[in-house]
Amino acid sequence: MNWFTETLETSLGRQVQIEYKKILTSSHSDFQHLEVFETVPYGKMLVLDGVIQLTEFDHFAYHEMLIHVPMNAHSNPKSLLIVGGGDGGALAEAVKYPSLETIILCEIDKTVIDVSRKHFPEFDKAFDDKRVTVIIRDAAEYIKHKTNAFDVIAIDSSDPIGPAEILFQEAFYRDVFSALTEDGVAVSQSESMYYHQDFIAELFAQNKTIFPVNEYYYTLVPTYPSGTIGFSFCSRSSGPTTHLQADRVAELTGLRYYSEAIHRSAFVLPVFLRDKLAR
Ligand code: SPD
C-alpha cells in the first residue's frame, strides 16, 4: 500500500494520511513542489509543498463557501478578484453568477494552473469564460495598484507558510481594503478553529483595525487537518447576512454544500472560538 502523509503538523503529534494508487504528476515550479495523486478513497488530490489543497471528494465544501458567502453578502457584485486559486475550483463557482462582469484570477504560480487544468477537468472550462482574466503575478504586488476596483475579493491561499505568508499580513489587508469598492466584501482562507485559535485571534485583531465589519465563518472539509477550515469575512460596510436573499441563492446551480441556511449558520461559532475572538 502507498500512503501520502501530510507532515505539516507531525511535530505536534498529528498528521493526515491518505492511501493512493499512483502519483499522476510531480514537479517543481519556481515557487513550490506540485503533486497530483490518484487516491484510493477521495479521487484525485492536489498537493502543494506537501500540503493537501483539494480532493475531488470534498473540495466543494471549501470552494462554495469561499465564493458564495461573499457574493451573497454583497448587494450586487459586478467585479470579483480571486487571489491565488490557480487550481480553478473557486473560479468554477464564480462563473455561476451571470451578474459578474469582471472576474480576475491573480495566481503567482502558472504551473498550478497548467497542472490543474490537465488533471481537474471539472474546473477547466471556467478558465475559458469570457469574463475571466488570468494574471500571473504576486497578488500582493498586483493589489497595491488597485483602488475602488472590486466588489468582492476572495483570497484562496495555501497556508501561511511559503509563498502565501504575505497574504495574511497587515499591509496586504490594508491594500485589500483600498482595492474594494465602498461596499466591498473580502474573505480569506483562515485556518482551523481547532488547531490554530491563536493565529485566528491575531488575524482577527489585525483586521479589526482595518475593516469596520469582521467575522469568522467555517466549513467542513474532512481532508484538511481537523476536518474544518474557516474564513475571515471583512467588509467595508454591510454584515454577512445584510443582503442575503433566498431567491438569489436559489438561482445558483450545482450546489452541494452552500445554501441560505448554511450561509447564516456558518457564522455561528462554537463558544470556545466566539469567546476567544470577543477578547
Ligand atoms: N491546510 C490546507 C489549506 C488549503 C487552502 N487552500 C486550498 C486551495 C484550494 N483552491
Image (spheres, rainbow, N blue to C red):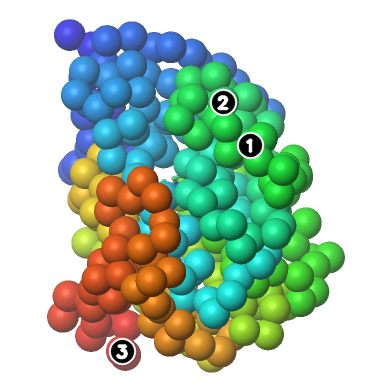
Q: Position of residue 228 (x, y in %)?
A: 25, 55
Query: Reading the chain from its start, which is encountered first: label 1 or label 3?
Result: 1
Label 3 belongs to which residue? 278
Q: Check contact, mark 1 vs mark 2: CB within 8 A.
A: yes
Is 114 left, or right, of 245 in this rendering? right
Q: Position of residue 134 (x, y in %)?
A: 72, 42
Q: Nearer the viewer, mark 1 or mark 2?
A: 1
Q: Quarter holding the N terminus?
A: top left
Label 2 belongs to which residue? 117
**Can you see residue 181?**
yes
Q: Position of residue 243 (x, y in %)?
A: 45, 82
Give the distance between the C-alpha atoms of the residues marked 2 and 3, in whole angstroms.
42 Å
Quadrant of residue 148 within the rendered picture: bottom right
Label 1 belongs to which residue? 127
Is 158 situated above or below 15? below
Give the residue type that dot 1 points to.
Phe
Give the distance between the C-alpha atoms of the residues marked 1 and 2, in whole angstroms.
9 Å
Give the residue type that dot 2 points to.
Arg
Query: Reading the chain from its start, which is encountered first: label 2 or label 3?
Result: 2
- Tell me what residue is drawn at x 62 percent, y 84 percent: 183
- Tell me what residue is drawn at x 21 percent, y 49 percent: 227
Q: Secondary structure at mark 3?
A: helix
Is 160 left, or right, of 77 in this rendering? left
**Can you see residue 214?**
no
Give the residue type that dot 3 points to.
Ala
